[in-house]
Image (spheres, rainbow, N blue to C red):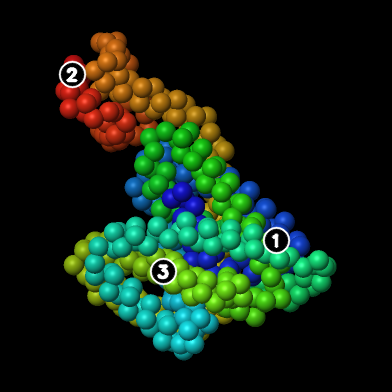
Amino acid sequence: MAFVGLTVGAGFATGQEVIQYFVSFGMNGIWGAVLAGIVMTIAGSVILQVGSYFLADEHRMVFRNVAHPIVSRFLDLSVTLTLFAVGFVMLAGAGSNLEQQFGLPAWAGALIMTGVVLAAGMLDVEKVSQVIGALTPLIIVAVLFAFVYTLINMPADTSHLSEIAKGADSPVSPWILSALNYNGLALLLGVSMSLVIGGNYSSPKEAGIGGLMGGALYTVMLIIAAITLYLNIETVQDSDVPMLELMNNINPTLGVIMAIIIFFMIFNTAIGMFYALGKRLTASTDKSFRPVFVVVTLIGYGISFVGFETLMTYVYPVIGYIGMVMIVVMIAWWLRSRARISLESKRRDRIHELAYNREHEDEEYTAEDRKELRKLVGESNIEDKELHKTITDEVKSELPDESMESPAKPES
């Protein structure tokens, strides 16, 4: 679900990304959503598995291991620039959201979001984001509701919708390239956290399965959103925030609720982007974080005056193409290293089993097991202490409370 939360972000919630990248191609755009979902499932699974293989706690060490030094530095710089670019697009999106629903000037809505982001940046951002991140299921519920409502009230004749949909602007064409560009955009935006999420799993196999499941859910949501907006294109075609327009068309009260959900989704993305950027730019010293965070956020506010739809049209495709390069690099390394990853996954599963037996008083754990455990840990691609700590922590979290209170069997 964490991987889905990363990819089903604020842009997805507004519906503008779905209109530009998929619906604008008519029925072909629906097939584009299917293609994008398949690629997202495969690439997402690979990224999570690679993160697990390296027990990643940040993206740079992974890039250094899977790519040429020049490519690695390029991807690292691209991730940093993406944080800033998506940050100021989110501020513009907040302006469009509040303007469309409540009639506020776009600059005022963006200013309100900027103020909220600056205030939150001075607090415990992780706790704030966890609370707001709980709204992700609400977006899923809202999209499902709109989909069901649309199907129930679907017009008898939909033959004219494709031509209307093609009237919407698309930043990338043809539809196949647009779908792949969207994958690049979503994955470059989420790669840092996706690698860290994967790094929380000692088993690459389990991380990969989690990626497949998350990707499958994402695919379903993307296709549903694309079909919903396609069938309602006559209503939403001129809107900066199509999902909000659709909800208002169903019921004004739902529109207000949706505007609030979208605002908080945008906030969650914006604070994540600017906070991570501030930390990235002040990695050598935390003392300068706050002034740097304030400056980059205010610069982002200034750029947001260009407008939400305009920024998406020109900024997102560039990010998408760079993301496509990253996807190729990651999948190419994974294909070359499948045998190593598979062997390491089996090794860690056995280490996990032995560690569980060692910590669990009711399981048999012999001197031969101790010898085997040390041998397997020594053969891993991860430092002995780091791997030992990671798997021991996993095992202890799986043990019943009474086992936690009992002393573990001695290692030697």
Amino acid type, label 2: Pro
Q: Give the residue pinned by disc 1.
A: 151
CA gap between label 1 and label 3 equals 28 Å
- Classify mark 2: residues with Cα within 10 Å, few (<14), some (14-19) or many (20+): few
> Image height check: is 276 above or below 92?
above
Amino acid type, label 3: Phe
In this rendered view, identify the residue nearer to me: 264 or 410: 264
Residue at x-position 75% and y-position 61%: 28
Residue at x-position 41% and y-position 26%: 349
- Sequence-first disc among 1 and 3: 1
- Sequence-first disc among 3 and 2: 3
> Image height check: is 233 above or below 47?
below
Residues at marks 1 and 2 touching, judged by CB atoms closer than 8 Å: no
Res. 378 in view: no
Q: Quadrant of residue 233?
A: bottom right
- Sequence-first disc among 1 and 2: 1
**Residue 411 x %, y %:** 20, 19
Q: Give the residue pinned by disc 2.
A: 410
Which of label 3 and label 2 is nearer to you? Answer: 3
- Classify mark 3: residues with Cα within 10 Å, few (<14), some (14-19) or many (20+): many
Q: Give the residue pinned by disc 3.
A: 264
Residue at x-position 41% and y-position 69%: 264
